[in-house]
Amino acid sequence: MTDTTLKEAIKEAYASAPDDEIIVYTIEMRHPAFTQPLRVVRDHKSFTGT
């Protein structure tokens, strides 16, 4: 995915998200050695995402 494509996808997601939704910046890492994806969130609060 090019940087331009990613920027357009983010704009679309922001524009279509409900007003009461909180945007949480995350990184998802996948590797054959992992049993499941590792997700890192840029926040200090614990929560369960869906």
Image (cartoon, rainbow, N blue to C red):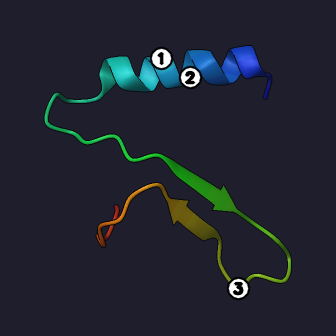
Front residue (pair 6, 45)? 45
Q: What's the mark number on residue 11? A: 1
- Quarter of the figure with residue 16: top left
Residue 5 placement, left or right of 50? right
Residue 5 placement, left or right of 14? right
Q: Residues within 10 Å of mark 3 (few under 14, many from 20)?
A: few
Q: Residue extending furthest front?
A: 44
Question: Residue beneath label 3, please?
Answer: 35
Q: Position of residue 50 (x, y in %)?
A: 34, 61
Label 2–label 1 contact, CB within 8 A? yes
- Quarter of the figure with residue 8: top right
Measuring 84% from the left and 83% from the top, which residue is drawn there? Answer: 33
Vertical order, 29 against 6 (above or below): below
Residue 9 placement, left or right of 47? right
Residue type marked 2: Ala
Q: Residues within 10 Å of mark 1 (few under 14, many from 20)?
A: few
